[in-house]
Image (cartoon, rainbow, N blue to C red):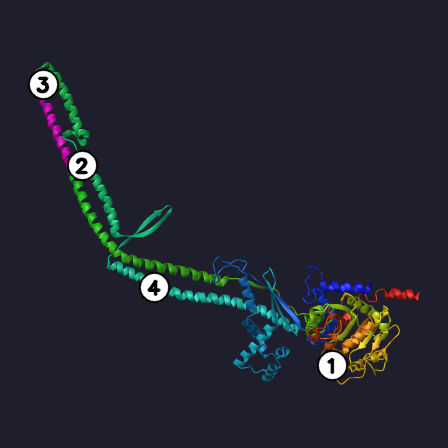
Amino acid sequence: MNDLTFDNRIAEDQAGPAGGVERDARNGQPMLMRYLGIVKRWKWLLIGAVVIGAIVGLIVTLLMTPQYSAATTLEIQREENRIVNVQGVEPETGPVDLEFYETQWGLLRSRTLAERVATELRLYSNAAFFEMNGANELAEEVRQSGRRPPAANVRRERVRTAASILLKNLEVAPERLSRLVVIRYTSPDPEFSSRVANAWSRSFIEISLERRYEATSYARGFLEDRLEQLRQRLQESERDLVAYASDERIINVPTATTTGEDVATTERPLIAEDLSTLNRALNEAVAARVEAQSRLRGEGGSTTEALTNQAISDLRSRRAGLAAEYARMTAQFEPSYPPARALGDQIAELDRAISREEARVRSTLQSTYSAAVAREEMLRQRVNGLESQLLDLRGRTIQYNIFQREVDTNRQLYDALLQRYKEIGVAGGVGVNNISIVDPAEVPNAPSSPNLILNLLVSIFIGGLIGAALALALEQIDETISDPRELDAALGLPLLGTIPNSEEDNPTEELDDPKTPIVEAYLSALTRLAFTTEHGVPRTLAVTSTRPGEGKSTTAYALARQLARTSRRVVLVDGDMRSPSLHQMFGQANDRGLSNFLAGDDDVGSMLHAQPNRPSILLAGPMPPNAAELLTGDRMAKLLRELTARFEHVIVDAPPVMGLADTPLIGSMVEGVVFVVESHETRTSLARVAVGRLKDSNARILGALLTKFQAQKAQYGYGYDYGYGYGEGRRKDTEAA
C-alpha cells in the first residue's frame, strides 16, 4: 500500500494540479516550490554566504573611522517681506513654486558656495583637513609650505579640491511639505562638522543677499543709462517741435476741457480759436440781421415799432379825441363852421405829425437792418478767410503732430523709467532676506556612523544576494537530474520508481531485508513494470545505465530478488563481460559463464549458480578479447530462449551504454530495457545520448529508475522521502514489546 501510495503521488506530481499557480516549465512544479527547493538544496552555500557577509560587515564596521554629522536647519520663504509697496527686480510668483525650491536646493549644492566656505574657513591651508579626507599628498604639501601664503594658482587649485571634498561629505535634505531644509555635514571631527554646517548656512544667506543686491545694482545702472538716453532724446524732440512751430508760425493756446467732474487742459491752434470766436459772432450777426429784417416788415404805421411807439400812440390818441369832437360838431354844424374848421385843421396837423413820426421810425429800422447786413457780410468774409488759413494750417500741422507724438512718447518712457528707478532704489534699500536659520548646528556628541546593526543587516543582505546568485548560477550549470519529474521532460521516459540512497557498504544485505525502504522502493518499481506488458513483468529484461557506478547491477539484482520472493523462477545474467560485478557481489569464482556460452559451450546448466530463496545467477565468465563480436551472433538469442524455457524471468545486468556496443545489441534481443539514472550525478546530455542509442537499436525502453536519490538534495526537497518506511517506528515498538 505504501508503494502504491508513493507511485500515485509521483503520478499526480507528473500530471500537475489544475490550479492557476505559476509553474516550472520543466516539470509543472510551482515556481515558489522550485525556489524553495533550490534554497533547501544549497542551504549551506546560502548560510555560508550570509555568515561570511556578516563577518565581513563586522570587520569593516570595526575598522571604519567614526564619522560625526552636524546639521543646521534653514527656512526658505518663497516671497520676501516688503516694507514698502513697490516691486523689486525679481518677478512675483505664487506661494507654491516647486521650481523655485528645486533651484534653491541646487544652489545649496553649488561649487561656488563650497569654494566660498572653503575660503572662509581657510581650508586651503589646513593640512589636517586634507589628511582627514585622504588627500595625504596635498596635506604634506601644505605642511611643507608652512606659513608662506600660496601662489594664486596654487590657492585656487587647493580651494577647488577642498570644495570637492566638502560637497562629497555634504547632504542637503529638504523636509517634505515644508519650507525647511536640513544641511548636514559629516567628518571624523565633530567640531569641524559643526563649523562647516554653520559656515555653509551663513555663506548661503550672504550669497543670496549679494545676488539680490547685485541684481538691484545692475538694474539701477541699466536704468540710469536708459534714463540719460531718453532725457537727451526728449530734449531733442522738444527742440525740433518748437523750431518747427516757430518756422511754420503754429501758435497753440491752452484750452480747458471738462469731462464729467474732470477738467483737462489741451492745446488748440490760435486760428482755430479765432475761427471759433468769429463763427459765434457771425451767428450773432445773422440773428441780428434776421431780427432787423423781421422788424422792417410792414408799411407806414403797421410796423411793430410804429405800433409800439409811445409818441405815435399819444398822437393817435389825441387825433382820435379830436376826430370824435369834429364828428359831433359836424353833426350839428357845417364843416365850414369855424370851430369845426379849426378842429379839421388840428386833425390834419396831427395826421402830418403821425406820418413824420412813422417815417422816422422806418428810417431807423432801415438803418439798423443795413448795419446788420454789413456786419454779417464782414464777419462772413473774415470767417471764410480763417477757414482757408485753418485748412492750410492743418496741412502744416501733420508734421507738427508727428513731432508732438515723439515728444509725448519720449516723455512717457522717461517718466516710467524714472518711476521704476525710484522704486528699485527704495526696494533695494529696505528689502528683507527670505532665508533664515531655524536651528544652528551643534557639536555632535555621538558618531553617526558606522552603524553596527545597519551595517550587519546590509552585509547579511548582500551576502544573501551573493549566495542566492551563486546558488542560481550553480543550479543553471548543474545538468544532473535531481528530481524524478525531470526524467520525462529531459529523457522522454516514464518514471518507474525512485530508489533512495543506501548507506550500507554491501547493498545485498539491505536488499535481503524486506522491511527496508530500498526494498519497498524496488517493489514499487516492480509493480510499475507489471503494467508495461499484457502478461505482467517482462520475461526477458535488461538493466543498463549511461555510465558505470549508477547502480544498474544493484537494480538488476534487486528486481530479480523481488521476483524470487514471489516464488517465481528467476535467473540473473551478468551481461557486462568487460567489467563483471556479480561474482564479487556473491563471492563466486568467475571461471565459467556467459562468455563461455557465447563462445560455443552449450552446457548452460553447469554455468548456473542456484541460490536458496534467491534468483539463480549466470556469471559473465572469463573476459573475451572482443565482447561485441560474441554478441553479434545468434548465441545470445539462443541463450535467452534456453533460459526462458527453464525460468519465468531472465534479467540481464547489461553494460553501460556510452562507448560500448554491447547494450544496444542486448537491448534489441530482450523484451524490455530498464534505464537506470543516478540522481544528482548523471548529466542530462549524456543520458539523452544513451537513450537515443538504445532507441536507434530498436530496443524497447520500459522506463527509467532514479537511483541513489537523496531528498535533501532534490531541487524541491519535498515529499519524496515520504512513504518508504511508513509505520517503521510503530513496528519496532511492537517488536520490542
Q: Amino acid at mark 1?
A: Ala
Q: Judge the density around disc 1: few (<14), some (14-19), many (≥20) Cα neighbours within 10 Å.
A: some
Looking at the picture, which amino acid does disc 2 mark?
Gln
Amino acid carrying mark 3 in the image: Ala
Residue that carries the numbered disc 2 in the rendered image: 293
Residue 581 occupies quadrant: bottom right
Residue 233: numbered disc: 4
User: Residue at image x 16%, y 41%?
Assistant: 371
- The residue shown at (22%, 50%) is 387
Mark 2 and mark 3 lie on one chain; the one further toward the N terminus is: 2
The residue wearing badge 1 is 628
Instruction: Specify the amino acid type for callout 4.
Output: Arg
- Going from the N terminus, do you reach mark 1 or mark 3 first? 3
Residue furthest left in the image: 336
In this rendering, the answer to whether 275 lies above or below 42 is above
Q: Quadrant of the N terminus?
A: bottom right
Measure the C-alpha gap from mark 1 to mark 3: 204 Å
Left-right relation of 449 to 588: left
Label 4: element kind = helix
* Residue under pointer 3: 340
Disc 4 to disc 1, how far (Cα)? Answer: 120 Å
Provide the residue span drawn in magenta. Answer: 340-366
Magenta-drawn stretch contains 349:
yes
